[in-house]
Amino acid sequence: MNEGHGLRWSQLGGITVVVAALSWIGWRIYLAGSGNLLGPASWVSSLLILIMAVLVVGAGLPVRRFLRGESTRPLSPIRAARTLVLAQAAALTGAGVLGWYLAQVAHALADLDLAGYHELLWRLLALCVSAALLAVAGMVTQRMCRVEPPDRGENGS
């Protein structure tokens, strides 16, 4: 994708904005139509997303060591390709989840006078930070998996 450059930050930003807009509309319809409140958010969810981010970066470290020539063990090309796919999936997931929770943050801020929304807002913000870190972890790991093209020399051959 992108002529071998992988995912770009602008693509992740676009996904976040689109998901946030669609989620905001969906939440607005759900909350206004039925008189419901935002659902609960868990601190455990933030922790799990952070653990996923750490695991994604951890999966990319052996690939980076191999590409830099620092590894004493061989690396399977399939494992390297799977690590790249994992990194890109994490980046896309982080962007989508960030949009989802940003829409909820917008609704919580609009109705901050409701009971329990102060605590909920902090949890939603923690989820936003965790999702953003997952996207960053995916992009960092994607960068770890990048193989630079060979030099073509002065004559272009």
Image (spheres, rainbow, N blue to C red):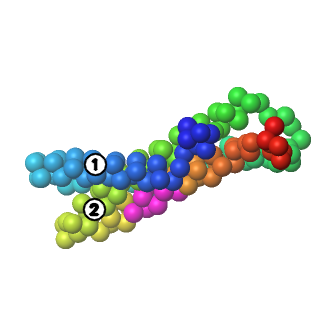
Residue picked out by circle 2? 106
Q: Residue at x 58, y 43 (%)?
A: 6
For marks 2 and 1, the one nearer the N-term is 1
Viewer-side residue, 150 vs 156? 156
Q: Secondary structure at mark 1?
A: helix
Q: Is residue 129 magenta?
A: yes
Q: Residue at x 21, y 66 (%)?
A: 110
Name the side, left or right, on which 36 lies relative to 132.
left
Residue extent of the magenta highlight = 125-134
Q: Which mark is residue 23?
A: 1
Q: Secondary structure at mark 2?
A: helix
Q: Residue at x 28, y 52 (%)?
A: 21
- Between the residue at mark 2 and the residue at mark 1, the CA separation in whole angstroms equals 10 Å
Most extreme residue toward the front is 155
Q: Could you say where residue 97 lies in the image, as x and y percent from the top left?
A: 41, 49
Viewer-side residue, 121 vs 7? 7
